[in-house]
Image (cartoon, rainbow, N blue to C red):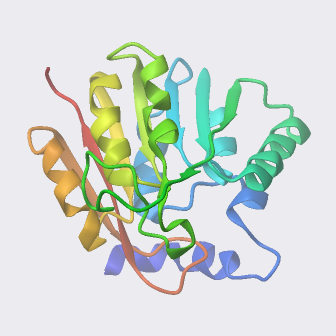
Amino acid sequence: MKASFKYYPAWKRSLAPSTTALSDGVPWITFEAQAFLDSILTPTGIIFEYGSGGSTLYYSKRVQKVVSVENDANWANLVQRALIQRELQNCECRHVPSKQSLRAIGSPDDPQSYFSSAEEYKNHSFREYVVSIDAFPDQFFDFVAVDGRARPACMYYARQKVKIGGYLMLDNSDRPHYQRSKELLASWEKYEFFGPGPYNDYFWETTIWRRLSD
């Protein structure tokens, strides 16, 4: 708890009405998780992220290459515009929308289904969004961020794309329907960051795993 107080000024600034993660160019994760990212990201790194935003700008300033997939077309355009305004040219932004299905044939907590828990996406399949990472070889990325839709399925597909010694991050990892997918990384080194973060008036958890072996 004591460590949380040092983030109070940054947290208070983040609650200003005109302030957003995109305008700030920061990831919407806990403060301690961002501090950890500050220590591990390198100029030669290659990143894949599910869900774009301020994090896209943040990564693009720190690594060699970012591949970002986003399901919302309007939001993807805003992120692309922000990248252009900041003259960040090392990010490949992909709009990969969901597709409406006749009925949900899987559960949002199932790592092998492609569904979101969000009510507005009920009966939408995120299969193409999830498997878009398969366009890249295994052990290709230094870091994969899972902070978009159908996160359990994203974790399932992302595992083999992370290099030995690389990292995978799941935001809001304390949500009950993400617990099954966390078991997929039981053999990885785990770093849990529960506490305050920007733009929210509550604490939550961001978890980062490091892949140590095949």
Q: Is residue 25 above or below residue 128?
A: below
Q: Closest to the observer: 151 or 14?
A: 151
Q: Quadrant of the C terminus?
A: top left
Q: Is residue 173 above or below residue 170?
A: below
- In the image: residue 138, left or right of residue 118: left
Q: Residue furthest top?
A: 137
The quarter holding residue 165 reads: top left
Q: Residue furthest front?
A: 102
Q: Closest to the observer: 165 or 51?
A: 51
The quarter holding residue 154 reads: top left
Residue 61 seen: no
* Residue at 52% over, 40% down: 129
* Residue at 38% over, 61% down: 104
* Residue at 48% over, 70% down: 118
Q: Position of residue 168 (x, y in %)?
A: 34, 40
Q: Residue furthest left?
A: 187
